[in-house]
Image (cartoon, helix red, strand yellow):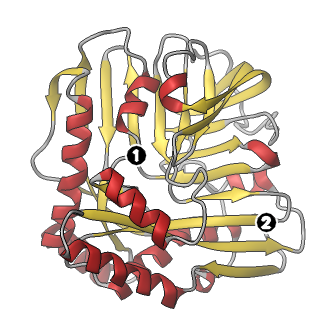
Amino acid sequence: MHLLTTAADPLAGYDRAESVLFASARGTLLTRGVRGVAAGDLATLAGRVDGPAAGAIGFDGTAHLILPESETWSPPLPPGAAPLVSGGWWSRRVPEPAAYAAAVRRALAELERGGLAKVVLARTVELRSDEPIDLPGLLRPLLGHGYSFAAPLPGGRTLTGASPELLVSRHGRAVVSNPLAGSAARCADPAEDRRRAAALTASAKDLREHRLVVEAVADALAPYCAGLEVPGTPELTSTETMWHLSTRVTGTLRDPDTRVLALAAALHPTPAVCGTPEAGARRMIEELEPFDRGFYAGLAGWTDAAGDGEWAVAIRCAEVAEHTLRLYAGAGIVTGSDPEAELAETAAKFRTMLRALGVSDALA
């Protein structure tokens, strides 16, 4: 999408029923109006969507893309302001923490039997507010944190969040994917925070989990790219709540007509949100997660008429309705995972959205 106008307020004109918001280091995109909706399987739509489009893609590959009447770009923003949402909250965890830990133990038993190298198990926190949820108020604290987004979904819901992970971007022939896998919660104490970061970079379990994801990303991009660059050692990156192992994979398209949605279809889902091998991991997810992921662990992003675009992995996110939110967080289970540690990791990942809401971390 080309720069049309620059809005002083990136949320000026935001309409939760029609607008898509997507913010990254490139800038803040806001679409206005709907000239059409592209819905269906991502692999099919990748060859059909040839104009500006933005929106969300589900974990199962079902896309809901807005074809906008117009769009504006604003400059990148610093991290957002203090939480703006208040009021009374009712909460429910699905599954309950003890049940989640039990599911991790079942997954570990399956891993020991062979056939699976990794499976990602998620849980949810469902929140209900006494007052209608102020979606722009929720969005503002998320702007400036990684890839922040809000995309309308069927049924009047909105997918919103602030993801640290780029599935893929395409600008001309330049392709970038930045998989994250291997995580540790941040700590307010600087010495302990540094200790956790150092432990993550030295963790054989986390390094193994990370390499599984990087290899899968490289294998998916290799047919499309020449001169693919895949660093052999991950870097350490962080958000306000988490440390992550990160590898930036870059390449040059062999065919300049390959569009970003085709690359996204080839990559999604990576082992970072599903597991490996994919078919076996999907079966375990269906068996052990007592909810439908919907658009969690899918994608949020945009593409333009030239085929350029950015698509972030839809993590650190929530599905929002008038009075309710469903927050999602997952953890990668590999041999050596500890059920209580994985439970604590998901609790830490919920904090991005809980803090944007101004509600207690204890709800996780």
Q: Position of residue 123 (x, y in %)?
A: 53, 72
Pick whichever, 222 or 169, lies toward us.
Answer: 222
Q: Quadrant of residue 257?
A: top left
- Residue annotated with mark 1: 269
Specify the label residue 184 is tagged with: none
Quadrant location of the C terminus in the rendered image: bottom right
Q: Quadrant of residue 106?
A: bottom left
The answer to whether residue 83 of the structure is visible from this angle is no
Residue at position x 72%, y 43% in the image: 153
Quadrant location of the N terminus in the rendered image: top right
Residue at position x 56%, y 45% in the image: 58
SS for dot 2:
strand
Q: Position of residue 117 (x, y in %)?
A: 22, 63
**Disc 1 versus disc 2: nearer the observer:** 1
Give left or right: position of 330 versus 138.
Answer: left
Q: Are marks 1 and 2 in contact (CB under 8 Å)?
A: no
Tell me the amino acid under the disc marked 1.
Pro
- Residue annotated with mark 2: 324
Pick whichever, 27 or 92, lies toward us.
Answer: 92
Q: Position of residue 7 (x, y in %)?
A: 71, 28
Is residue 278 positioned above or below 311 on the image?
Answer: below
